[in-house]
Image: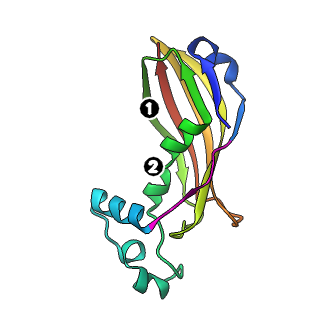
Amino acid sequence: MTTTVSFQDLPALAGTDLGYSAYREITQEQVNLFADATDDHQWIHVDPERAKGGPFGAPIAHGYLSLALMIPLSEELLQVDGVTTKVNYGLDKVRFPSPVKVGARVRMGSTIKDVTEIAGGYQIVLENVVEVEGTTKPAVAATTLYRFYE
């Protein structure tokens, strides 16, 4: 479900639960491409045969791949009209409580914790949890900051 608001209405969103994104499957191809982009070719990510005998019983996505997916997942949850620029301003806290096995499906839930006015725009603070379908522990829990400029 996407929440769409105008730039001027951002301050009223503080405390708003944005709900959940759709599920996305994590593929071995994604993991391999991420390994190539980051030069992190650890066998638990890129060697499916060896990973079967490893600590997770299957290849897993890089934690930072799971984190990076928060960008497109957040786009599913919040759209702001009347914005000229949106900037990923950073992270306040990130945790990776459980791995994401290749083939698993993930989704993200977000709540807007705070909205503050900044020069030329607004900064929003989102509390996010990336869930793995069928598991009890989240894959990622992170606080993200975005800046929107008019």
Label 2 neighbour load within 10 Å: few <14, some 14-19, many 20+ = few
Q: Residue at x 61, y 44 (%)?
A: 128
Rendered image quadrant of residue 65: bottom left
- Residue 63, x across and y down, in percent: 47, 60
In front: mark 2 or mark 1?
2
Per the picture, the main secondary structure of the magenta-coloured stretch is loop
Q: Residue at x 48, y 25 (%)?
A: 147
Residue indicated by mark 1? 89
Residue 118 relative to residue 5: left or right: left
CA separation in Å, label 2 and label 1: 14 Å
Q: Is residue 121 above or below residue 14?
A: above
Label located before the other in sequence (2 or 1) = 2
- Mark 1: which amino acid? Tyr
Residue indicated by mark 2? 68
Rendered image quadrant of residue 4: top right
Q: How is the image coloured?
A: rainbow
Q: Is residue 59 above or below residue 12?
A: below
Magenta-colored span = 20-27
